[in-house]
Amino acid sequence: MSDPVVYLNGEYLALSNAHISILDRGFIFGDGVYEVIPAYGGHPFRINHHLQRLDNSLSAIRIKNPLTHSQWQAAIEHLIELNQLDDQSIYLQVTRGVAPRDHRFPEQSQPTIVIMTNTLKTVSAEKVRQGVAAVTLADNRWLKCHIKSISLLPNVLLRQEAQDHNADEAILIRNGYATEGAASNLFIVQQQCIITPPKGPMLLPGVTRDLVVHIARNKKICVKEQPITEAELMQASEIWITSSTKEILPVTKLNDKLVGNGQPGSLWQEMYLSYQDYKEHLRSGRALPEL
Ligand SMILES: Cc1ncc(COP(=O)(O)O)c(C=O)c1O
């Protein structure tokens, strides 16, 4: 669609008519937070989890959520209807609003709210089948990575550096431990047990990560939320990265070495099928599997 409809501060506008001030603190300071929510067959994926994480990010940067959850949900659903794409990726952003440039919070400002939607870009079937390459890079981001901040310059640079090495993702290492990807969470398999780093300020609590942990526990697969050393990462029999758009993606090459036998592993296969099943329930409007 050449000129999709977007939501800006309560109005539904053609993208070409939606404008914000250059004094918006999102533009000037990256002073805001965001969410990316996939929608399958018009149904947003785990919307309550995304809205809960939005609340957490907003309160961490001391912005009062300008909308209630039901207002968010109504706006998102209306925008999905207006744009009528197949599967969609909904991007929403809240900034501290427009004010004269000053690092301190303005005494009064109205948060800027943007919601837009695009066709969901999925990972190619070939990459899912063969797995992707990743490189390890030093995690040089800030110490509040649990906030889904729009200040993404370190993530942008890290992802580009991965790309420069012909890799799809950077797996980040801080103080000898793997934290997450530049835009994804990390899982490894060690002796048939799935391991992902525990939540905390060093990583974003991914909605997909949580779903993967739930699905695995439901299937009585061994899951541990514990730190992963760089050495454990290097010796893992399987490595996966997860995100709302990548879903569960196997990493089959790390720093030019094969992971396991270089093929997506059997636990990945099992988890991938369950995840697709969950998605299909959502897409067709059937009751979701109990999790
Ligand atoms: C740094 C980072 N970690 C993890 C994730 C995965 O989060 P989610 O599964 O909620 O998409 C993202 C998603 O963009 C991210 O940017």
Image (tube, rainbow, N blue to C red):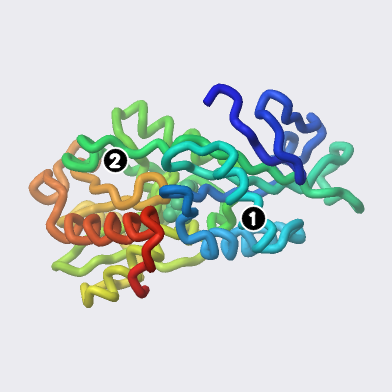
Q: Position of residue 89 (x, y in %)?
A: 49, 42
**Closer to the eye: label 1 or 2:** 1
Most distant residue in the left direction:
261
Between discs 1 and 2, the one toward the N terminus:
1
Which secondary structure, mark 2? strand
In the rendered view, does 152 fall on the left or right side of 159? right
- Residue contact between numbered discs 1 and 2, judged by CB atoms under 8 Å: no
Q: In this view of the protein, which residue sits in the foreground, 76 or 255?
A: 76
Q: Quadrant of residue 120?
A: top left
What residue is pinned by disc 1?
A: 74
The 10 Å Cα crowd at callout 1, few under 14, some 14 to 19, many 20 or more, is: few
Q: Position of residue 202 (x, y in %)?
A: 49, 59
In the rendered view, does 175 fall on the left or right side of 30? left
Which secondary structure, mark 1? helix
The 10 Å Cα crowd at callout 2, few under 14, some 14 to 19, many 20 or more, is: many
Q: How many marks?
A: 2
Q: Residue at position x 17%, y 55% from top?
A: 269
Q: Residue at position x 71%, y 39% from top?
A: 12
Q: Quadrant of residue 58?
A: bottom right
What residue is pinned by disc 2?
A: 134
Q: Position of residue 66 (x, y in %)?
A: 76, 56
Query: In the rendered structure, which amino acid carries the disc numbered 2?
Result: Ala
Q: In this view of the protein, which residue sits in the foreground, 103 or 30?
A: 30
Q: Residue at position x 34%, y 60% from top?
A: 281
Query: In the rendered structure, which amino acid carries the disc numbered 1?
Result: Ala
- Asked whether mark 2 lies closer than 8 Å to ligand 1, one says no
Q: Residue at position x 90%, y 51% from top?
A: 108
State whether residue 216 is above or below residue 1. Answer: below
